[in-house]
Structure formats: structure tokens, C-alpha cells
Image (cartoon, rainbow, N blue to C red):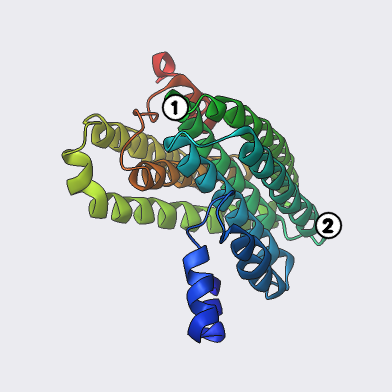
Amino acid sequence: MPLVLLFLILGGGAGGVSYAAEGAVPGSAFYPIKINVNEKVVEVLQFSNQAKAAWDTQLVERRLQEAEKLALAGNLATSTEGVLQAALKGHAKDVRDHVEALRAEKWFGDAEEIASNLEATLQAHGRALSQLARHDADALDFSHIVEDESNSGHDQYREIERQIIGTSSPEVKSAAEGKLTAAQNKLAEVRKFLGAQAALLATSTASSTLSAVDAQLKLVEDMIAQGKLKLTAGAYGEAFALFARAQRAAQEIKHVLEVRHDLKDELEDSLQDDDFLEKVFGHKKEDS
């Protein structure tokens, strides 16, 4: 991980200060070191559009985690909220700009995956912030900003998806096969993560979480199965779309679980609400 290398490179007292700054939030003494030293050093080590986009996506998540940490403590004050909102918008725009550069270079698969991950990140944390409004009313306003950024990313993602589906048949077949592998790997990754968190979830106050996760992962499996049928039938574009949606759904489920873990299970179950089902799977509970 780049930040670990940063601490090793700095060493001694400087490395210790940089490490301590990693947990800082806006308003704390170490926060300028976090964003102006730690993150800037990592930024200059990213050379390709893929690497830059991946790092900017991490920066989006870091700002969202800071907002959640402050909201949970009831400290998302107007000044810190403004700082985080501006930073979030800037990082999200940087990701979308890198995605556009990848599209121009015809790296459609990389562009799709990065756009998908950004959307999943924003969706999971946006729902978390809306729930944290019971701790800090400003969190609800922040969640609306996150939703706006998510909608912008969603529009870009749909454009990329249409672009991939519209390419020549051999290219779409290859893209669909690659996306099938990616979706299966992401599903396995979520199941592994869930296994590591199962004991905690089973004893948590949100007892419905495990059953909700199982139900959503079953939908992911069904979507992959449908995609395989389309792939066999030669409907490569439809197969790609199904595999991509399955991968994105699995990624968002993992983000939700990670956020719950980081916030000590302060969130209500958000894996069964209509917004999650409609945006990720394309239907609401009554249609399932």
C-alpha cells in the first residue's frame, strides 16, 4: 500500500508524525500533514491514468470516512463540512476526468471498472451519512452532496457501458468474458470478507444484516448466471451489462459492510431498502 511505503521512506520522527496524521480529521492539528504531505507524496507516485484514478477514488473515500467520523461524534460543523464537501467534489471530478482520458485512449474496460467503483463508494457512504443525521444534522446535507456526485458518476458509467456494448462483436465478447471473471472474483472477495465479519454481525444489534447480505449476494449470483446464459447465446453486450452490474452490486455490498464495521455498527440495515435494490439491481422489493 502506498501510504505504508511512505512511512517506511520517511522513517524516524517524520514517519511517526505522518503515521499519526493518518487518523486526523479537519480541525485537528495533524490534518494539514495528512492532506498536504502524506497524500501529496502518494499522488506524485501515480503515473498512469489508471493509477491516478484509483488513488483519487481512495481520496474520495478518505474524505467520506472523515465526514462519517465527525458526524458520529456530532462534530460535523459548518466549517469542516465545507472543507470536506469542496475536497470531495474535487476528488470525484478528478476521477471522472481520468475516466474520460481512459475512454479517449480506448481503455474502456478500465474506465468502466473505475467509474463503477466510484459509484459504489459514493452510494454506500452516502447512505451511511444520511443515517448519521441522528447524531449530527449536518450529515444529511452532506449526504445530498454525495448523492449528486453519485448521480454524475452514474451517468458517466452508463455512457461507458453503452460504448462497450456498441463496439465490434469480438471485442464485446472479450470484454464480457473479462467482466465475468471480475464479477466472480468480487463475489468471492465479499464472501471472504463476510466470513471474517460473521461473528461480529451475528452478535450485533442489526441482526438482519447477515440475512440481508445473503439475499443480496444471491441476487448477484443470479445475475451472473443470467449473464452466462447470454454469453452462451452470443448476446455479448447483454452479458457484459449483467456481469458489470453484478460486480458493482458486490462491490457496494462490501462497502456497506466495511462502513458498518468502521462505524461500530451504528447504522441501520440499508441492504434491503428500495433505493439500494433499484439503483444496484434495477428493481424494488415488490418486483423481486
- Left or right of 246 on screen, residue 158: right
In this rendering, position of residue 82 left or right of residue 241: right
Q: Which residue is mark 2?
A: 104
Residue 234 in view here:
no
Is 281 in front, or is 22? Answer: 22
- Quick one: SS at disc 2? helix
Q: Nearer the viewer, residue 78 or 22?
A: 78
| Residue that appears at 36% across and 32% down | 267
Which quadrant of the view contains residue 253? top left
Query: Residue 242: where, in percent of width, then height?
Result: 53, 40
Q: State the SS at label 1.
A: helix
Residue 52's x, y, as percent?
69, 64
Q: Quadrant of residue 105?
A: bottom right
- Cα distance between the residues tagged 1 and 2: 38 Å
In the image, which disc is placed on residue 174?
A: none
Residue annotated with mark 1: 131
Amino acid type for the residue under numbered disc 1? Gln
Quick check: 204 left or right of 236?
left
Residue 176 in view: yes
Q: Residue at x 42, y 38 (%)?
A: 73
Question: Quick one: 221 or 201, which is closer to the camera?
Answer: 201
Query: What x and y, as percent, mark residue 144?
Result: 62, 27
Does residue 233 appear left or right of residue 258 in this picture? right
Residue at left offset 44%, top offset 45%:
255
